[in-house]
């Protein structure tokens, strides 16, 4: 008998993927220039030059059996040492190569970490709006995702999180810079959350883990600082990805980092390895591991994303749309011009605009715009946004 839960997951694509596929058929129908696809966070900015240079050198100089062979399940120890060095020097944090687990991107890191720290019947809290796949990963552990709405400025509502924590709470997932809002959580929010988790862990007599999902760490504008979460709360696991920083999402590489300051760090790490093993992750792609060891801390040209943010933010505000001005990542979270965001997203299609309705992000009434697109497409799409606003003018 087929697994019904998995059949449903595989049959109904995520709303984001659904819209992306629809975009492909719309392009065939109307032509490339008539479609403004803001659905997927697939970077359009080329990877940094260094990515090509390192890959070329690796292919030229490295033994093919080493380059394409299995590594240790946790990842190559030299690669993990380079990453630990980077974390130590960049964030002034303790880091130990033996507590870094190389993964096929943040999605794999999140799945393995959740598999380790969450058991059946427990719950995981996340500020909403949230990345929709969290629900899939948490439910795969037989646990329950508990979204807690953020404040109006999309920063975490610490009091509301305090109320939501109970004896079933195993972990909290945060994501800053945030998908879908672009908001970067300031130090005081991380410190407040850390204080809360310390108190609640004591109250319930167990560790409540903090999972910091960080695929957008380097994608911030105007010199804004992204606090390093383990420096605030020792029971943190960072799930990092190179997908967005290096514009290589299809290559699938990232890691889970267990803070050495964590009580039982070694046991937690081994449990993450066990969860990864149970999920069928043999080792992260070997070639990519060796690539990222040479590329810690570098990123694609974020000047293009900043330009896109500025173009869209000022034009859309002028046309009457409302949104938070993002400090990072490459998303705008825009209030829908009618109560039902799905209806609004459908109306936008008429103008070739593909905007993701926010219902699956746990925060109805908005649409997400992924502006990691070419500046040219963004400029050409402005007229479509203006026409869409005109259509809904009387409802504003
Ligand atoms: N977490 C967030 C918040 C994301 O936006 C994404 C991808 O868009 C992921 C995790 C998964 O990233 P990866 O490609 O590294 O698996």
Image (cartoon, rainbow, N blue to C red):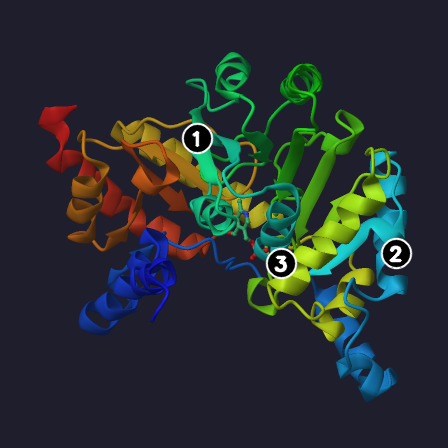
- Dot 1 corresponds to which residue? 147
Pick the residue in front: 260 or 78.
Answer: 260
Pick the residue in front: 313 or 131.
Answer: 131
Q: Is 151 drawn above or below residue 333 in the view shown? A: above
Q: Point out which mark residue 105 bears.
A: 3
Q: In the image, is the residue at mark 1 within 8 Å of ligand 1 by its beta carbon?
A: no
Q: In the image, is the residue at mark 2 within 8 Å of ligand 1 by its beta carbon?
A: no
Image coords of residue 114 (percent x, y): 60, 46
- Residue visible at 82% across and 61% down? 293
Q: Is 298 drawn above or below residue 144 in the view shown? A: below
Pick the residue in front: 339 or 204.
Answer: 204
Q: Secondary structure at mark 1?
A: strand
Mark closer to the observer (2, 3): 3
- Dot 2 corresponds to which residue? 82
Q: Give the image quarter of residue 363.
A: top left
Structural distance between the alpha carbons of marks 2 and 1:
36 Å
- Residue visible at 29% across and 59% down? 12
Q: Secondary structure at mark 3?
A: helix
Structural distance between the alpha carbons of marks 1 and 3:
23 Å
């Amino acid at each position: 008998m087929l697994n019904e839960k998995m059949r449903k997951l595989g049959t109904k694509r995520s709303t984001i993927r659904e819209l992306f596929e629809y975009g492909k058929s719309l392009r065939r129908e109307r032509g490339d220039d008539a479609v403004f696809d803001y659905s997927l966070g697939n970077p359009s900015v080329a990877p940094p030059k260094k990515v090509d240079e390192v890959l070329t050198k690796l292919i030229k100089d490295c033994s093919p059996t080493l380059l394409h062979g299995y590594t240790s399940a946790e990842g190559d120890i030299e690669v993990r040492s380079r990453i630990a060095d980077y974390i130590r020097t960049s964030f002034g944090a303790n880091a130990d190569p033996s507590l870094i687990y190389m993964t096929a991107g943040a999605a794999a890191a999140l799945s393995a970490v959740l598999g380790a720290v969450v058991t059946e019947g427990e719950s995981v809290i996340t500020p909403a709006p949230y990345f929709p796949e969290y629900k899939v990963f948490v439910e795969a552990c037989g646990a329950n995702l508990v979204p807690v709405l953020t404040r109006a400025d999309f920063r975490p509502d610490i009091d509301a999180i305090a109320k939501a924590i109970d004896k079933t709470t195993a972990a909290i997932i945060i994501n800053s810079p945030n998908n879908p809002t672009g908001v970067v959580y300031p130090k005081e929010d991380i410190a407040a959350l850390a204080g809360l988790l310390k108190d609640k862990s004591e109250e319930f007599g167990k560790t409540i883990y903090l999972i910091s999902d960080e695929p957008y760490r380097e994608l911030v504008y105007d010199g804004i600082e992204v606090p390093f979460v383990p420096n605030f709360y020792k029971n943190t696991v960072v799930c990092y990805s190179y997908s967005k920083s290096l514009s290589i999402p299809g290559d699938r590489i990232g890691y889970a980092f267990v803070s050495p300051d964590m009580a039982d760090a070694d046991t937690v790490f081994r449990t993450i390895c066990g969860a990864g093993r149970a999920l069928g992750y043999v080792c992260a792609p070997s070639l990519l591991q060796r690539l990222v060891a040479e590329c810690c801390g570098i990123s694609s040209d974020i000047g293009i994303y900043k330009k896109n943010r500025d173009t869209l933010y000022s034009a859309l505000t002028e046309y009457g749309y409302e949104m938070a001005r993002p400090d990072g990542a490459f998303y705008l979270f825009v209030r829908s011009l009618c109560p039902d965001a799905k209806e609004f997203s459908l109306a936008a299609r008429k103008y070739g605009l593909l905007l993701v309705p926010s219902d699956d992000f746990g925060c109805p009434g908005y649409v997400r715009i992924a502006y990691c697109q070419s500046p040219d497409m963004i400029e050409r799409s402005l007229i479509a946004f203006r026409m869409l606003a005109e259509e809904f003018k009387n409802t504003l």
